[in-house]
Image (spheres, helix red, strand yellow):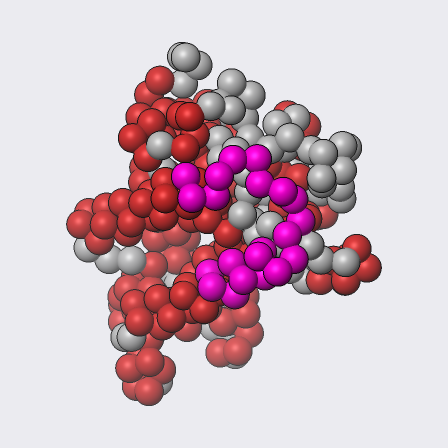
Amino acid sequence: MDTEIDFISHEGLIRAAFFAVIFSGVALAEHALPRRLPGVPKSKRWTANLLMQFVDVAAVRLIFPVLPVGMALLCAQKGWGLFYYVPLPYPVAVIAGVLLLDLVIYFQHVVFHLTPALWRLHMVHHTDRDIDVTTGIRFLPLEIMVSLVIKLAAVAALGAAPLAVLIFEILLNGATMFNHGNIRIPFGLDRLIRLGVVTPDMHRVHHSVLFKETNSNYGFSFPWWDRLFGTYKAQPDAGHEKMEIGLHGYHDERALRLSSMLVMPFLYGRK
């Protein structure tokens, strides 16, 4: 246990290493096997999206005294949460923790789409005019903070093991970059992969301008929740090459400037 806690104490370094490797791997795959031709210069989009990630990280570090893994360590010390009242074999508890936290994020995503005030925050993610690895880190700081509060509450309620929370965070971050990737995966291989992991073709449907397609395929890491709760759509009606990405009314320069994105929720519906 002491060895595990010592390992988890390096959370920041571990997550940064996974981020760098996955981001670089997806970016290289996009360059080698692109699924769609870019509609706008990549340099503009990448600059804005990467700056947004920098603002997100800075805001979280400045405002939150504890992050999900730290909350899990606190729960372990205090014996808080469901898993401390319903003890399970440790490997089962870790797997259950990862799955249940991912299920929470699925429902969170649905609620962000269906609740007008929360949609104003989440819409910034959907105004990206193309979709690639940087779309997976394009989230408004306020949305990140609301999501973090939800994750902290879920970790505390479950009493999820610190290792489960670390695995969940790495999977969520990595899967989000992967499934936003502009990567061409052969149809047969894609069908096989999406049995266990959300693929780029599966998630891209969610970024369609069509309402019925935007409100589908909410999963980030695992595809099972969409199938289970009836929100799964296999392919976009127009096909992946011809489908329109983004949000109606926002196919302009506002989607390419950090300053515009930061105020967009407060000006929703205005030109």
Would you place residue 4 above or below residue 78 in this image? below
Residue at the spot 71% in from the left edge and 39% down from the top edge: 241
Would you place residue 140 above or below residue 63 in this image? above
Residue extent of the magenta highlight: 23-44
Instruction: Give percent across and percent down for residue 57.
Output: 28, 51
Would you place residue 6 above or below residue 159 in this image? below
Would you place residue 151 above or below residue 80 in this image? above
Instruction: Give percent across and percent down for residue 162.
Output: 37, 70
Residue at the spot 62% in from the left edge and 60% down from the top edge: 32
Instruction: Specify the farthest residue to the top.
Output: 270
Instruction: Give percent across and percent down for residue 184.
Output: 69, 54
Instruction: Give percent across and percent down for residue 222.
Output: 61, 56
Q: Is residue 115 left or right of residue 183?
A: left
Residue at the spot 42% in from the left edge and 26% down from the top edge: 253
* Residue 131 is covered by the magenta coloring: no
Whether residue 16 is visible, yes or no, is yes
Tally of numbered discs:
0
The quadrant of the image that shows the N terminus is: bottom left
Closer to us: 27 or 197: 27
Residue at the spot 36% in from the left edge and 48% down from the top edge: 50
Closer to us: 8 or 156: 8
Instruction: Specify the farthest residue to the right.
Output: 188
Q: Is residue 210 left or right of residue 126?
A: right
* Residue 29 is covered by the magenta coloring: yes
The quadrant of the image that shows the C terminus is: top left
Q: Quadrant of residue 199?
A: bottom right
